[in-house]
Amino acid sequence: MYPSLISVTSTFSELRSKEVINVRDGSLLGCISDLEFNTCTGEICSIILPGNGILASLSAKNRIVIPWRDIERIGKDTVLVRYDCDTRTGSGIG
C-alpha cells in the first residue's frame, strides 16, 4: 500500500566503502578516508580522500578535501562529487 522508504542515514563505515567519482570528468578520486565536522553543530563539513602515491594515506599534504556542499549524490556503491582537479577544490556552488 505504501511505498518503501529509502534510508537517508549512513554510517562512516558505509561511506568509507564507497568510491568517489568526479561528475566533471568521470574520474575515480578514491574512497573516503575521513570526515571533517563542526564540533558545535555536529554537521559534516567535508569528506577527505587520501592523495595519490604509496604513502598518500600517511600525509595530509596531498589529501583531497571536498566540501559537503559539493556532493551531488550518495548512492549504493558510489559518491558523486563536483571537484576541480586543477585547483584541488570543490565547485563552490551551493
Image: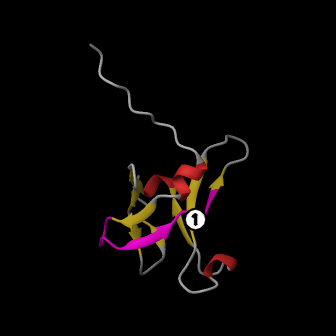
Q: Nearer the viewer, residue 84 or 52?
A: 52
Q: Is residue 91 visible?
A: no
Q: In x, y percent, where is residue 15? A: 52, 53
Identify residue for label 1: 48
Residue 40 left/right relative to 93: right
In this view, 82 is above or below 29: above
The magenta span reads 23-35
Residue that sits furthest to the left in the current view: 1
Magenta stretch encompasses residue 31? yes
Question: Residue 13 appears at what percent x and percent y?
Answer: 59, 52
Kindly indicate the quadrant of the structure image that contains residue 33.
bottom right
What's the amino acid at mark 1? Ile
- Residue 78 against residue 41 in the figure, above or below: below
86 left or right of 41 in image: left
Q: Residues within 10 Å of mark 1 (few under 14, many from 20)?
A: some
Instruction: Determine the residue positioned at 59% across, 86% down.
Output: 54
The answer to whether residue 10 is above or below residue 91 is: above
x and y percent of residue 34 in the render?
Answer: 62, 61
What residue is shown at x 38% (from left), y 63% (from top)? 82
Going 42% across and 77% down the picture, which residue do you hit?
A: 85
Image quadrant occupied by the N terminus = top left
For residue 51: magenta?
Answer: no
Name the one closer to the observer, 9 or 62: 9
Q: Residue furthest right?
A: 39
Helix, strand or loop status at disc 1: strand
Observer able to see residue 69: yes
Q: Nearer the viewer, residue 91 or 73?
A: 73
